[in-house]
Amino acid sequence: MSVRYKMVISCAGWVAGISAPRGPIPNLMNGAMSNGTLTGLVANTWAERGIAVPFTTPALAQARMRRDDGSKRREFVLPSLSGGKGCYVMPWKSIIGTMTTTLHDRVLFDLMQQHDVDDPIKMRHVTLEVAAKGLSGPRAARKAQEILDSEKQYQVLTTFLLVLQLLKLVNVSSKDLIADGLATETAQKRMRGALLGVADRLKIPHDDLYLRIETLSSLIAPIGLPQAPEPGRLRALTDDLILFRDTVRGWTSSMPEEVAQLGEFEAKVAELTNQLASKTVLKVDTETEALAAMLRAWEKRFTSVSSEVRQLSWLLDGWDYVITLFHEVSDKTDKERQTMIADTFPLLPQIPREQLEVIDEKKASALGVIQRRWVRANEDWRSGVLDYDQVQRIEARRAGMK
Amino acid sequence: MSSLEKWREVALVSLGLPDDKLLGVLALVEKVPDRDQVREVLDKIRPRLVKLKPPRPITGQRLLFRPVEDLFDPPERYRARIGRLSRHTIHPCWLVVHNLVDAQLLERTERALKTIEVSNSADIYAVGLPFWKAAGKALAGFLEADTSIGRRKVGSDSLTVTEDMRQQLTDISDILGIAAEVETVKIHLPEKPIQALSEVDTELLAEVISRLGNESTRKVQTFILVVLARMSKPGDLLKVLAEASMPCTIHERNGLVKTVGTNALSKLAFEAQDLRQTKIKTSDPVEGTQVAEQMVSRLASLEKTLGGLRDRNVVEQIQTTRREIGTYVLDTLAVKADEALFENLRARSPEGGGKSASKGPTIEQEESAEKSALSLRRCARIAESVGVRREMEQKLAVVCSQLEQEATAPERDEEARERRLIRSVRLIELIAGPDEAQRVLMSQFNSGE
């Protein structure tokens, strides 16, 4: 069986610019790091880093999918696959030739191709669709269905809040609107009339106004509006990073030095990601606050918000899994927390070079040493048999994710 | 109603209580001074307590049996002459010790026990050491004073001593004599069942064996007997014994390894027999599979060590045990798992079936079906080592074929049909792997096009 794969050494540069655990600079293969430099090791762009794919095959858990530079076909970046330093990059054909994958993963891959998934938001939709069918277990199916339903409702809420914001322009308050109940004919008439007033005032065709609001609501629902009673998914995840940072720091400060360094590193990655994410959320909030201006200069402003939302989804892509692992051990022993810290290390979402102004290569390069020490034992896949107990643990995790 | 009958009723009612309530009853029962009265309650709820592992206050009686606790079997599963003890022996043994040990020491010990933490092994050891020594001597004295069997007077009480009880009391007395070594090792070794011995563990064991070996071979045998009961792979300990430095000939050493190894093997053989005869009750196939897996692992470990002795009886016993486990896996476990799987898969409950009008199993029932499927897969994995591979393969082929029929059965409601298809396909995946599951799934999609 011919297996095509290539190995890249990227362990040392998960996140450049962060003070990494100390240690000698590893003598890595293929010359990429022969002088301790990170040239070519940190992903330059989001596309190069790839999208986290929630596969249930243990060896593939949180692999990242990206397009091959030349052929543009999909390939997967697998951290710590062999238990060694670096990542393997393999096309799907090689993966299925090398290991047994779950039925869920096979169906997921087919759908990824059908829907031409090329960003984390599309990935999430496809993932939820597959999970809702029941292919990752009954509990994950119920959870996926609940998420799909609640996200639909959240989008309706976001639309409603945007409409309310617009109605203020024509001096109609939410109180006026729902004085006789929101679903009544009178209220609906009043709202339609008010929106016509808004459209006239903004000099936008009447039909376009509501379409733009719907489109915007669909775009920003994953973040949600600041005035919403509940934060959107990505906004909540941004806040979770701070909890993660503080808690992991607290846990690891009294742990052995090696773990403490690793914990501190993870805390810093979380902090940096939170800083970048918060800036992005703020930009989106600022744009939506000036909703009237946005609707007037629709093309330009909408493109700008789209780019910010896309940026945020890439930035936080993969963090939901790490945060779930983190919550799982919140009431567990130090030993289990140490394992979590080690397990999440290779999965930490990388921040590409283009996103960072300062890259402290020397410090980041030392991560390779830690990566060598903290490896996952992918033993079962080597024997060619799927460890379904482990698969079920991953599925259970999926059922607990937000 | 006599008080004994009342306690019997308490026992029956307790069995139906949820865990937290059961622990409440236990706390009350623990306060009853007359242990005889409540013994039946404790015996009845013991299987639940083994799982719940509630911290129980240490009494003088519990302290006495701490070094020998790993050797006790329930009376219905106890077999003589394999170095095990029956729970029925606890009471007469305690009677002897209670009556013959220095009363002041007993009182001092019981007073000290009230002040220490249940989880503090070091403190328990410190309090227990003089008591174990004295109790061991008291038991030995009792046995030496009168070697006859029959009714014996102990203080104001009397008890019937059988030949087997004499042997058990002798074993307990021997273990109490080396309680210091046993308890020290228990503190330092991993929790039972011990999966593997580290280098440090091996060194500690070798050192203790060597020290006891200088005193007498019998002490080594007694020590091994106790530690062996804590081992998940008993062969590992036998290997330490075979390599430890002792002042004896190779022949004597091999004899020792054979004696303790054969005891462990006999215990395993009886357990396998009990499993087949359902004397060991496992609550579900998942638990049963775990038990079978552990037994296979123990057998393989013993075979590795004892196989080298080239003893015909040992070889025969290994083969018999393997057959017993094989029969249990095939005739009991696989059958139970199969039944549980289809029972849950075909369940119709009001809350199952999602939005569809057609009802299906609940999530819990689906998960139970998946657990049963995994049990079948694990049975298949151990089938080869217990000589039932072909039979197990046939069994799984039948189950998969039934599942395929379930998957492809016609259904008017499209949503319900799809849910049932996925449910069945997932079970096929767990049993036969993703390739087979994919084949069934694709065949449905292709036939639907």
Image (cartoon, coloured by chain):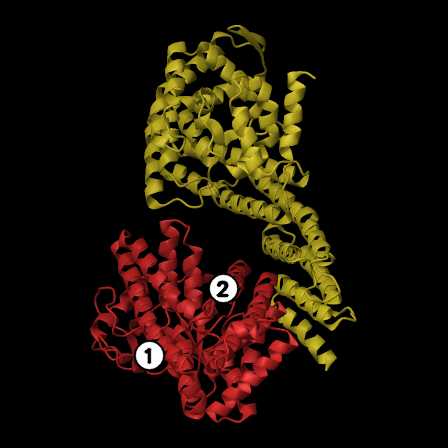
Chain ID of residue with mark 1: A
Above or below, B62 relative to A292 = above
Judge depth for marks 2 and 1 and give the one in front.
2
Q: Which part of the image, by quadrant, shows the C terminus of chain B? A: bottom right
| Residue A69 visible in the shown view | no
Relative to A318, is B38 on the left or the right? right
Chain A display color: red
SS at circle 2: loop
Q: Chain of mark 2?
A: A
Check disc 1 and give the amino acid type: Pro
What secondary structure is found at the residue carrying circle 1?
loop
Q: Write down the colour of chain B.
A: yellow
Relative image position of residue A107 (x, y in whole percent): 58, 75
Which of the two residues, B373 or A67, is positioned nearer the viewer here? A67
The answer, for residue B238, to whether it is visible in the render is yes
Q: CA distance from mark 2 to mark 1?
A: 25 Å
- Residue A401 tag number: 2
Amino acid type for the residue under numbered disc 2: Met
Density class for disc 2 (Cα within 10 Å; few <14, some 14-19, many ≥20) is some
Residue designated by label 1:
A352
Mark carried by residue A6? none
At x 31%, y 63%, the residue is: A267
- Quarter of the image with the N terminus of chain B is top right
Q: Quadrant of residue B270?
A: top right
**Residue A344 placement, left or right of A356:** right
Q: Answer few, some or many: residues within 10 Å of disc 1's Cα (few below 14, many 20 plus, some between 14 and 19).
A: many
User: Residue B168, position in %: x, y?
Assistant: 52, 21
Give the mark, 2 or 1, whose residue is nearer the N terminus. Answer: 1
* Pick the front one: B205 or A376: A376
